[in-house]
Image: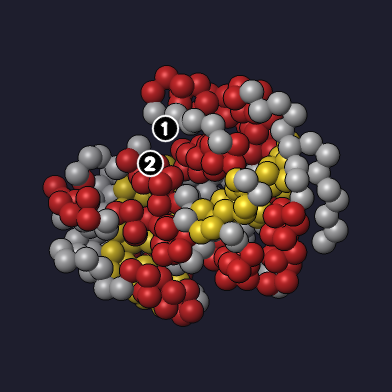
Amino acid sequence: MSYAPATQPTFYFIGVTTGKSSIMRVFPAWAKHFGLKDAVIKGLDFPLHADPAAYREAVSFIKLDPLSLGALVTTHKIDLFRASSDLFDAIDPFAAKMHETSCLSKRDGKLICHAKDPITSKLAIDAFLPEGHFGRTGAEMFCMGAGGSTIAMVGSLTQPSESKNFPSRIVVSDLDPRRLEEIRAIHGGGPAGTRIDYVLGQNAEANDAILSQLKPGSFVVNATGLGKDRPGSPLTDAAVFPLDGYVWDLNYRGDLVFLKQARAQQTQQRLHVTDGWVYFIHGWTQVIAEVFAIPMPTSGTEFETVSRLAAEAAKAA
């Protein structure tokens, strides 16, 4: 890929199909609202599990180009970290523990790697799950996909401050045994009071089987990218969600097959179903706050204003 020096303050979005993301319309509205004069966003698309040299080239360019201020990284969080960690001048504690980056920022000429997902996923979960849900119900958690988002979610829900509200069991499935080993190395068997099972889900039927064994009220998450970066769902149409379950599709755009499967059972199974829009808001605003060194609301009237601006801009054709 050829990189031309930025001619105005530039914020990069490193993903797969960045041009389809609402952020390309939302960022200009937010930039105006937050007074980020002349700042622009630019997408950098890479195929899944791209050549490490391609990641290094992008990171090196951002590091050395004066008006390239930083980036949000999605989908490639782990691969980019693995390929480029020696290029970072500083790595925050979450990124060091999780071996991933979701945010690149620059301070005093230094390139800093951040992992924001533990913060943003907890903010999004708190907006969806009732307070104390796991401790009160004994419910379980099932994450399909063992990438950076799941690493962050599991970590945020099993930190010591959550000891009275751990899921009774966490199941993580993935098609890639290497991903499962990576997340196992980070989280191990789980803290006292819960356990984590890592399951090689070789097909959607295997995920269906796990789903069928979950306790009522369990929390089910599609963190595979299926439905956005790739078409489809990690479940078959025969899958049955747990009664009174909470179902979260991290996607908010794409064919959203998983989300449709859950909504088809919403009444019968008394499901609480949400998409990835609130996660989108928190994910982007926390990275923008880091890159541009500005305060950012996480709740209240100002957060509602930021959310409204995003919804209005996203709808604009």
Q: Amino acid at mark 2?
A: Leu
Vertical order, 289 against 120 (above or below):
above
- With 98 as the anchor, is 82 left or right in this view? right
- Residue 88 point in image, percent of width and height: 60, 61
Q: Amino acid at mark 1?
A: Thr
Viewer can see residue 276? yes
Is there a contact, CB below 8 Å, between mark 2 and mark 1?
A: yes
- With 7 as the anchor, is 135 left or right in this view? left
Please give the residue where the numbered disc 1 appears in the rendered image. 298
Please tell me which residue is depicted at 44% across the width and 74% down the height of the picture. Answer: 182
- Residue 109 point in image, percent of width and height: 66, 49
* Disc on res. 123: 2
- Residue 18 point in image, percent of width and height: 69, 49
Please tell me which residue is depicted at 85% across the width and 58% down the height of the picture. Answer: 2
- With 126 as the anchor, is 145 left or right in this view? right
Bin the neighbour count of mark 2 within 10 Å (Cα to Cα): few under 14, some 14-19, many 20 and up: some
Please tell me which residue is depicted at 33% across the width and 69% down the height of the picture. Answer: 187
Please tell me which residue is depicted at 28% across the width and 50% down the height of the picture. Answer: 245
Q: Earlier in the sequence, mark 2 or mark 1?
A: 2
